[in-house]
Image: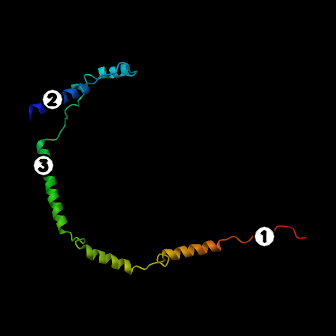
């Protein structure tokens, strides 16, 4: 690094360090409360505030035995999984099987209607639902 670059970087860092110091604006209406909070928490955290060391922990041999048991259970489970006859190995065969099942199921006539047929049926119901002409309520002469 050239000496000029080193001086420029040092100068930039020195200029920034002044802005990092925390100061409270004395003219602010919150200044007394801010200073009170800063002063009351100046020595936080204290060692007394940290939790105590845990007690009643299991023995190292017990933890090791539990770990060995879990590893043995994992090996047993892995063996059981390997014996399962998985049917999802061939996605194309599964898709063909599902398609055959769907094709074999009977379809309701309502479900087989197209959107145009449904709209025509709805319009026919709207046409039939028109009110009859009003009655003549005038007295006969």
Q: Residue at x 52, y 77 (%)?
A: 117
Q: Which residue is mark 1?
A: 135
Tags 1 and 2 touching, CB below 8 Å: no
Cβ atoms under marks 3 and 1 closer than 8 Å = no
Is disc 3 in contact with disc 2, using a CB cutoff of under 8 Å? no
Residue projecting furthest to the right: 141
**Does 69 sit above or below residue 105?**
above
Image quarter hosting the C terminus: bottom right
Of labels 3 and 2, earlier in sequence is 2
Q: Against 122, is 64 above or below? A: above
Between 121 and 53, which is closer to the camera in this rendering? Answer: 121
Q: Earlier in the sequence, mark 3 or mark 1?
A: 3
Per the image, label 2 sits on a secondary structure element best described as helix
Give the colour scheme shown: rainbow
- Residue tagged by mark 2? 10
- SS state under label 1: loop
């Amino acid at each position: 690094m050239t000496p000029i670059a080193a001086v420029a970087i040092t100068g930039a860092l020195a200029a920034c360090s002044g802005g990092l110091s925390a100061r409270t604006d004395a003219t602010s209406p919150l200044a007394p409360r801010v200073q009170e909070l800063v002063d009351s928490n100046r020595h936080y955290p204290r060692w007394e505030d940290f939790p105590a060391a845990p007690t009643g922990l299991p023995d190292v041999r017990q933890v090791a035995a539990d770990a060995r048991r879990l590893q043995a259970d994992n090996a047993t489970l892995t063996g059981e999984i390997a014996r399962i006859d998985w049917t999802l190995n061939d996605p194309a065969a599964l898709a063909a099987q599902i398609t055959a099942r769907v094709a074999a199921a009977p379809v309701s006539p309502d479900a087989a209607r197209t959107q145009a047929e449904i709209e025509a049926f709805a319009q026919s119901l709207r046409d039939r639902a028109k009110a009859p002409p009003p009655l003549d309520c005038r007295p006969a002469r």
